[in-house]
Amino acid sequence: MTQFPPPRCAAGFIFALETEADPFAMRVCDATTLRGPALSFHEGTIAGRRVAWVVSGAGVAAAGQAATVLLEGHAPGLLVSAGFAGGLDPALARGALVLATGAVREGAPRLPLARPASLLPAASTDVDIVTVDSIVATIAAKRDLRAATGAAIVDMETHAVAAAAAAARIPCASVRIVSDAAGDELPADIARLVIPQSAFRRAGAALAAIGRKPAAAGTLWRLWEHAVVDSRALAAALERLVAALPEA
């Protein structure tokens, strides 16, 4: 039987994007960084507890690989898939905090997720999150995905993170902010902004989108404003989660 090390960190967090992670990182004290060939892993203290985190990039392959390395190198007691998600349930408003109870993915088993009690009063629960391979941008596509899966929100990473946690026999939670509601349409160029790339290249992609469709400028600006607000709300929720974790 495989032996896993005792927890060294209270929790480990997998973010897809720097935008999601930055406000959380700003709350962490005494942070250290281990830079690898592809990813940088961070450790520090928040709410008096040791935590680790990584920005994996979008998608199941990136998230799964990052989660596995974080588990091996930092031995967290809880793994958390954290970030933004698209809304599929019309009852969920943009900006809602959601703790899913299960992670689903086409062709894969449903994986149970932990629900941190510290966040339950503020979060929507008893719902599933579905992990897909590309951004679900249109109202029609969101409606169809909800009908097919019954999920309330959608992302591109949680099922992979939950699978890594299950293999390591530790609990996994999904803490997500609804960045676009079920009734919101996303611009077609939004996919260019979530692929792994430097901030310079991401800015170039945004400018290129505006150049092709000047009307997209207002939409992209609103998305950015929402991302700033949502990432701060996410960071506050994650700090509450860490503060309420039991002592190792």
Image: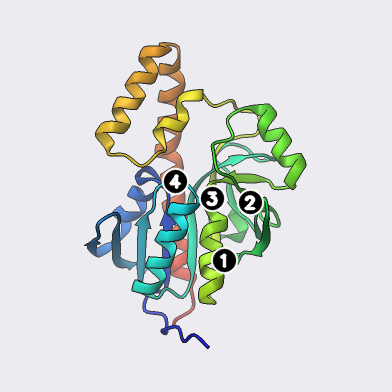
Whether residue 143 is situated above or below residue 30 in the rendered picture? above
* CA–CA distance in space, label 2 to label 1: 16 Å
Secondary element under disc 2, as helix, strand or loop, is strand
The kind of residue on which mark 2 rests is Ile
Give residue 108's position: percent from left, percent from top.
66, 58
Q: CA distance from mark 2 to mark 4?
A: 16 Å
* Residue at mark 3 to residue at mark 2: CA–CA distance: 9 Å
Query: Residue at image x 54%, y 73%?
Result: 167
Circle 2 Cα neighbour tier, 10 Å, few/some/many (<14 / 14–19 / ≥20): many
Give 244 or 146, whichever is nearer the viewer: 146
Q: Nearer the viewer, mark 4 or mark 3?
A: 4
Q: What's the residue at 73%, 47% (across, down)?
A: 149
**Closer to the N terminus: mark 2 or mark 1?**
1
Residue behind mark 4: 58
User: Disc 1 residue type?
Assistant: Pro
- Left or right? Give the position of 162 relative to 196: right
- The residue that mark 3 highlights is 176
Mark 1 — residue? 116
Circle nearer the N terminus (3, 1) = 1
Element class at badge 3:
strand
Q: Nearer the viewer, mark 3 or mark 2?
A: 2
Which amino acid type is shown beneath numbered disc 3? Arg
Q: Earlier in the sequence, mark 3 or mark 2?
A: 2
Element under label 1? Answer: loop
C-alpha distance separating marks 4 and 1: 24 Å
Viewer can see residue 142:
yes
| CB within 8 Å, label 3 to label 2 | yes
Q: Is residue 48 at all visible to an observer of this figure?
A: no
Q: Position of residue 4 (x, y in %)?
A: 45, 83
SS state under label 4: loop
